[in-house]
Amino acid sequence: MPPKKILLPYKKERSLLSDVLPYEIPVSFSNRHLYAFILRHRIQKNDNKEIVWLKGTPALDRLVCMLFCLPNNPHRLSDVKRLVGENLLDFRRYQLNDSGIPKPNRMPRPEGFLVPFCYKINHKEAEFRELCIPHPRSQLLVSEFYDRCKEAILYYTSLSPFSIRAPSKVAKFTFHNDKLHKERLSVEPSKIEVIDSEYESLRSFFVYREYSNIYKFYESYRYHRCEKKYNNLIKLDVSKCFDSIYTHSIGWATIGKDAQKEALAESGGSFPDRFDRLMQRMNMGETNGIIIGPEFSRIFAEIILQSIDREVEHTLRSGGSRLEHQVDYEVFRYVDDYFVFYNRDEDRTRIVDELQHALRRYKLSLNSAKAVVYEKPIITEITMAKQQIAQLLEKRINFNLDEVVDENGEVQEVNGSVFVNSNALITSFKTIIKTCAVEYKDMLNYTLSIVERKSRSLVEDYMKVDTDNRSPRQMANAITNIVEFLFFIYAVSPRVNTTIRLCRILEVFNSFLRQGHFDRAQVQIVHKLIYDNICFILKKNKSSEHVQVETLYLLIALTALGRDYWLEQGVLSEYLGIDLASVGGRGATGDSLNYFSITVSLFYMRDKVRYNELREHVVDTAIKRIRDRSETCHKDSELVLLLFDLISCPYVPSDKKEEALKIFGVSDPALAADMIGYSDDASKPQRWFTNWLEFDFAKELDAKRSQEVY
């Protein structure tokens, strides 16, 4: 039965699931429950006038107001009736503007500028990238903006002759997850919807044309055609692109500098002005730089870079020595990376100069230190290393199946064997890295993707062998050697995307080991190896303000090993940077723990008695984090996320939840109790951002399986 194309009902809030969060977030965190809450209560922002929701209890009113940074002002809150379909429903209305409100009653008024939750991840050697999660109200504004301006977005991202990653239409279909469709899933699923591709679930608000990942471009017909047509390739990128973007330049890119000034003076409600204000307001009013991580930031940058592309192409076509695109040269741009194919050095000089000039007019520049030129045969060091690594893994990680057939060609029995040598793998891998002059970080994701595919194949092939002919000892030994190899290459340069792949491979083996094909001793050998390696990495990469998300995945991965492999309280506290013996004195107190570290550590510790002392301290650290920034807590995304997860966490005492709510201005004990006990579904506790209960690690990793970092 072929996969069924299922038409998606259009919901503007869909962007909350795909376009407002970075990829690099803990597996226990998601927007699914926020999305469900908004839909259930029909929460909408209408222009700059109001936010409305279905009428409910006072606890619901306060939760909505706190979630979306609406100050507790009864003069702004009223009952209204709205027609929904054929039904007249009761709503609550929070007025955002001052129209009709007497001057003495206008304060407090909603904050204009909000504070995103920013955190750092490993990016390059001794270099970090700061990613941001917008405030929930900012996320609601993004969904409203997408709904209002989706046609304009699609128009302004369709103009470049260079871009190979841009929205092409609103995604309308998902696919029924039947058995045949599962068999046809691509090995490397994509983070974004791609034209003519089939994926299990919607991953982006828009469908993207051509290439969902840069490595697909390297393997494409267009890339290979240019290798044949041109003699040279130069790779360039924009220096600190997102950090350098001037938000007002969205107007220059769409209607021009002079026209923008005139248009804004007249209306203030044009597409570029709306996008400009959206980006500013979610980032504390900043005009220099945009937040990094969410897809909508890439769309903002894409519109600006498309204007630059057009300007460069037009300039090269004009003037003295005309250069025609796709005749004299060819440029491909993937986000902020440029690939310029050319034949003559003088053409390259002119192309790069014009690109640099155009970028400068937008307060951007090329990173000249990272420019790399390749001559025919055009093959990069990374491409050579990839080819050799693929050959190595194909040869060294393989299950040898042997079918015994009778004289009629019927299979009578299936035998099989597998031998993996971690030392040989490690030595060969290091040799490839050295001889091809590449770095571990450049090859890790690719290597792990192959190992993941090979690991799944090993398990499938092992199960094809007749039960009496299987060798559990041999298979367990192969798994052990693969795990040794995995942790060796991973430990050199942990990154979030490689950590996710590592966890997926470990889950393949863990779920296989749980099926009862191995004796307890064989399972324990593998689990002990995983446990020891994770402990080593946690000690090596103690939690700090810079490296948290990478290792938090491993903390959750430990829970899959079972009760014999829980960390000792001292080991966990050391990882979190907390010296329990010195708490209250001058020792390390874990003050650097951010929202993710706090919630994931609580998620890991659960209500286990062995962690009572540490859990109490982590909760106190969370309360202190809110109290220390109490003056701005409502508009601070990190503190709002932290508050909502604390009050829904089953492992946090009620008095601590009340204390956190009190800092947010909820002093009525009865109201606080109703907010803590609030649930949309009476049969289960309310969840906000962290999935405290009914968490399925394998399922969540599978959800990540269809996402990739650009």
Image: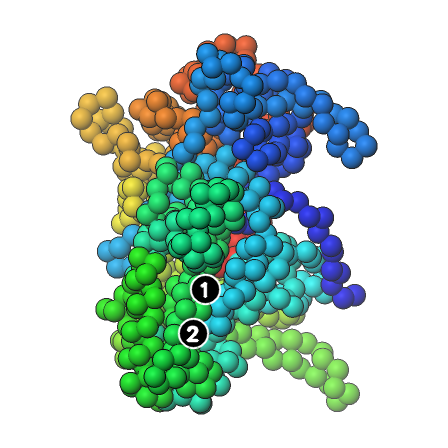
Query: Does residue 670 sit above or below 356 in this rendering?
Result: above
Left or right relative to 419: residue 340: left
User: In what quadrant of the picture does the C terminus appear?
Assistant: bottom left
**Do the residues bearing badges 1 and 2 touch, measured as CB atoms within 8 Å?**
no
> Quadrant location of residue 192?
bottom right
- Colour approach in the figure: rainbow
Could you tell me which residue is drawn at 59 percent across and 62 percent down?
168
47, 302: nearer the viewer: 47
Q: Name the residue tied to disc 2.
A: 314
Does residue 598 show up?
yes
Instruction: Name the N-terminal-most of marks 1 and 2.
Output: 1
Query: Does residue 529 sit above or below 468 in this rendering?
Result: above
Q: Name the residue tied to disc 1.
A: 306
Q: Position of residue 595 (x, y in %)?
A: 39, 35
Q: Secondary structure at mark 1?
A: helix
Amino acid at the residue labelled 2: His
Q: Position of residue 289 (x, y in %)?
A: 34, 49
Q: Position of residue 506 (x, y in %)?
A: 47, 56
457, 378: nearer the viewer: 378
User: In what quadrant of the picture does the N terminus appear?
Assistant: bottom right
Could you tell me which residue is drawn at 62 percent across and 66 percent down?
195
Does residue 672 show up?
no
Amino acid at the residue labelled 1: Gln
